[in-house]
Every structure is written in C-alpha cells, then in structure tokens.
C-alpha cells in the first residue's frame, strides 16, 4: 500500500489517494478548532485517540449491519477507508438538548427530548456550516430524495446502536454529527465518530467528556478523550 497525493485537508483530518483503486487513507491531526475556526489549538494525542476510537465504533456499527467507510487501521494516526464521495451535508443527531439547540430555543442544556431530532447543515467552512432543511437539500440537489431518506433511516439505526453501546460504557450520547458519502452508488457512513464530533456525558455525574472541554476551556481535554477511549475498550 502506498500513500499518494493529498486529496483534501480539513480542520482535523487529511485524506490521501492510494495506489489501490477505491481506497483512501485518512490521517487524523491533533489540530482542534471551534466556533467555525475562530478558536484554534491543539489537543495532544487527539489524532491517535480519534483514529482508534473511530475505528472501534465503525467496527461496532459494521457488526450491527451498518456499512461504513472503515476498512482497517494502518498505524496510530491513519486508517484505510473506502473512497467515498462525501455528500456535503452534516447530519446532527440529538437525543438531549445541548449546544446550539439549547441556545436557539432558549432551553437548558440537559433537557430531555421526547424523541430524537435530526438536523442538517450545509458543509461549508467559509459559510460556517449553515443550517438547512429537506427543501434546501432537494432544491439545491445536494442529495436525491431517495438518498436523503436513506440518510435519515441510517441515522436512526446508527443512533439506536450507538446510544445503547455508549450507555453500556456509562456514557450518555447527548448529540453528534455524522457525514455520509456515496460508494458504488450506495449511501454509506463516512467521516469520524469521536469526542470531537459527539457530546458525551458521564452517566452518573453528567461530566462532559468531549470537545466542549476545549470549546469552553473546562480543562482536562486530553484526559477526557483518553477516558472515553478507555471506557470503550474496557
Ligand atoms: O454546535 P451544535 O450544538 O449544533 O453541535 C451538535 C453536535 O454536532 C455536537 O456534538 C458537535 O460536536 C457536533 N458538530 C460537529 N461538527 C460541526 C458541528 C457540530 O461535530 N461542524
């Protein structure tokens, strides 16, 4: 396996072509950003932790019958993935009110939702990922109606698996972001699943063990990421 040219560099990851057809390499960086890149920093060893944690969760999801882009771990910072074409939609899944939803609706963080809420954002760094709905997705041809239905039904399935799995590890899955892509004309799960993209609270104390520790300067950022990984692997 050879790593060839860089295809894409985002805030937390780089994607490379390989000499093998339909396979890319994803490299996880330690760089951390928040508030659309306004706050910048590094979380030491974040790349290693998120690479390992994403691999772990992608395997759990594959075992539950949910296809995703993960093929195998290559080393501490890199994984081999299927060469999906990312659909430019961020899918936010919320089980409990937190973050921007708390702010938007004037609700306390931690308020229970009687059912799972799915929201969409247009994936654009320049625009700061603005919120969109089904009509925008349709009118702007970001995804077909069939693809969007698949994204929604996969999101609900993924949520059932992940919420239950995290709870077994004494973690509440409050909310998170998923990205999907096209691979051989199928919509499959891609990107990452890590404390960068999920809100995870300790089930007993509600202590935040995710990127909010960086966003809100709560301290013990790296320690919290390590704690989540430790629990998942226990
Ligand atoms: O900021 P907000 O409350 O809308 O975020 C909802 C969830 O989506 C959080 O878990 C956050 O970490 C994740 N998210 C993300 N990347 C973004 C926006 C949100 O991972 N660009």
Image: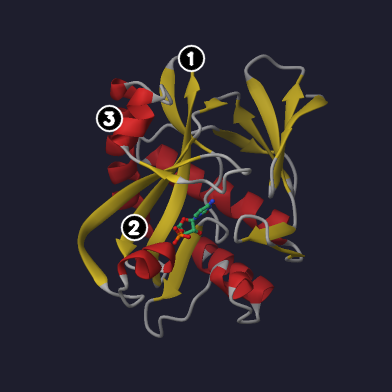
Residue in view at x 37 percent, y 58 percent: 165
Tell me, yes or no, if residue 93 can be seen here. Answer: yes
Q: Nearer the viewer, mark 3 or mark 1?
A: 3
Q: Secondary structure at mark 1?
A: loop
Q: CA distance from mark 2 to mark 3?
A: 18 Å
Q: Position of residue 75 (x, y in %)?
A: 75, 44
Q: Residues within 10 Å of mark 1 (few under 14, many from 20)?
A: few
Residue in view at x 36 percent, y 32 percent: 136
Q: Is residue 17 left or right of residue 225?
A: right
Task: Depth check: give the residue in front, 216 or 161.
Answer: 216
* Among the 4 quarters of the image, the one containing residue 143: top left
Task: Depth check: give the residue in front, 122 or 225.
Answer: 122
The residue that mark 2 highlights is: 94
The residue that mark 1 highlights is: 184
Q: Position of residue 23 (x, y in %)?
A: 65, 23
Q: Is residue 58 above or below residue 109?
A: above
Q: Position of residue 124 (x, y in %)?
A: 57, 40
Sequence-first tag of 1 and 2: 2
Mark 1 C-beta to ligand 1 under 8 Å: no
Q: Is residue 138 left or right of residue 227?
A: left
- Residue 149, numbered label: 3
Mark 2 C-beta to ligand 1 under 8 Å: yes
């Amino acid at each position: 396996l050879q790593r060839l040219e860089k295809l894409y560099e985002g805030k937390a990851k780089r994607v490379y072509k390989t000499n093998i057809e339909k396979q890319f390499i994803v490299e996880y960086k330690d760089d951390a950003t928040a508030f659309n890149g306004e706050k910048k920093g590094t979380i030491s060893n974040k790349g290693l932790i998120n690479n390992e944690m994403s691999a772990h969760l992608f395997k759990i999801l594959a075992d539950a019958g949910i296809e995703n882009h993960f093929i195998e771990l290559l080393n501490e910072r890199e994984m081999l993935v299927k060469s999906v074409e990312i659909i430019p939609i961020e899918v936010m899944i919320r089980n409990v009110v937190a973050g921007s939803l708390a702010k938007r609706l004037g609700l306390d963080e931690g308020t229970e939702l009687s059912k799972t809420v799915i929201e969409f954002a247009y994936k654009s760094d320049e625009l700061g990922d603005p919120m969109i709905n089904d009509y925008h997705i349709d009118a702007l041809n970001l995804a077909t109606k069939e693809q969007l239905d698949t994204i929604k039904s996969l999101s609900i399935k993924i949520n059932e698996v992940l919420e239950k799995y995290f709870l077994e590890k004494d973690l509440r899955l409050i909310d998170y972001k998923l990205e999907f892509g096209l691979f051989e004309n199928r919509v499959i799960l891609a990107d990452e699943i890590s404390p960068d993209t999920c809100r995870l609270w300790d089930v007993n104390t509600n202590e935040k063990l995710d990127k909010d520790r960086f966003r809100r300067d709560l301290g013990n950022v790296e320690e919290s990421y390590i704690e989540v990984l430790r629990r998942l692997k226990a």
